[in-house]
Image (spheres, rainbow, N blue to C red):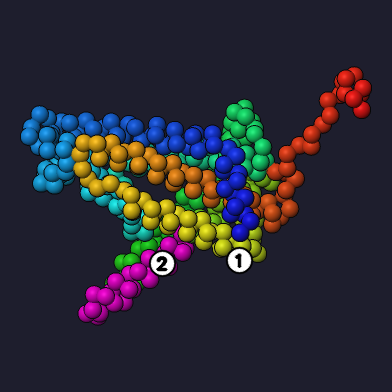
Amino acid sequence: MRSFSDGWRRVRSAPALLVGVYVLTLVLALPLAITMRGLLQTHLGSSLAADRAASGVNYDWWQEFRSQATGIGTTFSPTIIGLAATLDAISGILDGRREVAPIAGAIALYLTGWTFLAGGILDRYARQRPTRAFGFFAAAGMHFPRLLRLAVVAGVVYWWLFRYVHQWLFVDWFVDRTRALSVERDVFVWRLALYAAFGLTLVIVNTIVDYAKIRLVVEDRRSVLSALSAARRFVWRHLGAVSRLYALNALTFLALLGVWALIAPGARGGLTMVLAFVLGQIYLLARLALKLQFMASQTALFQASLAHASYAAAPLPAWPESPTAELIR
């Protein structure tokens, strides 16, 4: 699909954006990591358990730590290792699991940072030419209030989905439907079907919000509700192309997960721990690049579908107006 390959071309043309979102992720994660380090250091001290933890994983100590941990310490579980971290995050979304206050605060700051950068990122990908730092941050600042209002509206919609739709599907309807079932496999199939239905609902909402962001930036719209309505019409009228592009990006994400499942180191100490950190950072960069690919490819599809290519086209080269140029002519 042309928009998919065009998206990767746009991502490769602006590597500074990947560096920027990686730094944002690192800066917001660092305080949480320092806090967790302090908790572990206080609990371990200079005990023998500390030596065993440095050389490998002591699951007995791990369970003891979790039994008395509070706040961010409760998130220190075996699911933070390798592929389990990603799967646990996906499961947490589908199950509507609430995060502890420090994590929730960091997520809120992270989403706010992404909302600010999104205006500059979409503007850069739409123009397909360097805008330099001044142009990037000018676009980001100009579009930030609009994108922030869109984020608030989207947040209300997501809250309603998790508060009422999720409650009805997984608590009310699921319990009534499976109460008389005696085979565990049938119960699992029903739950899997509900996961698929709820996940599809989230994908639809997410797609409409994504194209609303693009319309706010590319068309310089002021009204968030107008952008959402226009995005909904665009998705409906180009449902096939939008679905194929989303499927390609989703398959790329699944392929990345498959590679990570194969290479992710286990819970060990020494040099293996250093290798796990390095591989984890490479995986994080790949995830962020894929996020940018979503934004770039959706922008490419939107521009190609609605003939907004002039917005993206680089300026025509102008011959320098000087006496020397006249002599050359």
Other residues around mark 1 within 10 Å, as few (<14) / some (14–19) / many (≥20): few
Identify the element where label 1 is drawn: helix
Q: Are marks 2 and 1 in contact (CB under 8 Å)?
A: no
Q: Residue at x 52, y 45 (%)?
A: 292
Other residues around mark 2 within 10 Å, as few (<14) / some (14–19) / many (≥20): few
Numbered label tally: 2
Identify the element where label 2 is drawn: helix
Q: Residue 166 falls in which quadrant of the image?
A: bottom left
Residue farthest along the front direction in this orientation: 328
> Residue 31, percent across and down?
32, 31
Q: Residue at x 15, y 31 (%)?
A: 42
Amino acid at the residue labelled 1: Gly
Mark seen at residue 196: 2
Q: Nearer the viewer, mark 2 or mark 1?
A: 1
217 over 162 or under it: above or below: above
Q: Residue at x 49, y 34 (%)?
A: 19
**Magenta span:** 176-202
Tell me the CA gap for discs 2 and 1: 20 Å
Q: Is residue 223 visible?
A: no
> Residue 229, percent across and down?
62, 57
Identify residue for label 1.
240
Mark seen at residue 312: none
Amino acid at the residue labelled 2: Ala
Our reading of the magenta stretch's main secondary structure is helix
> Residue 225, percent across and down?
60, 52
User: Depth check: 179 or 241 in front?
Assistant: 241
104 over 327 or under it: above or below: below
Along the horizontal axis of the image, is 23 left or right of 180?
Answer: right
Q: Earlier in the sequence, mark 2 or mark 1?
A: 2
Which quarter of the rendered picture does the C terminus lie within? top right
Residue 184 part of the magenta-drawn span: yes
User: Depth check: 300 or 149 in front?
Assistant: 300
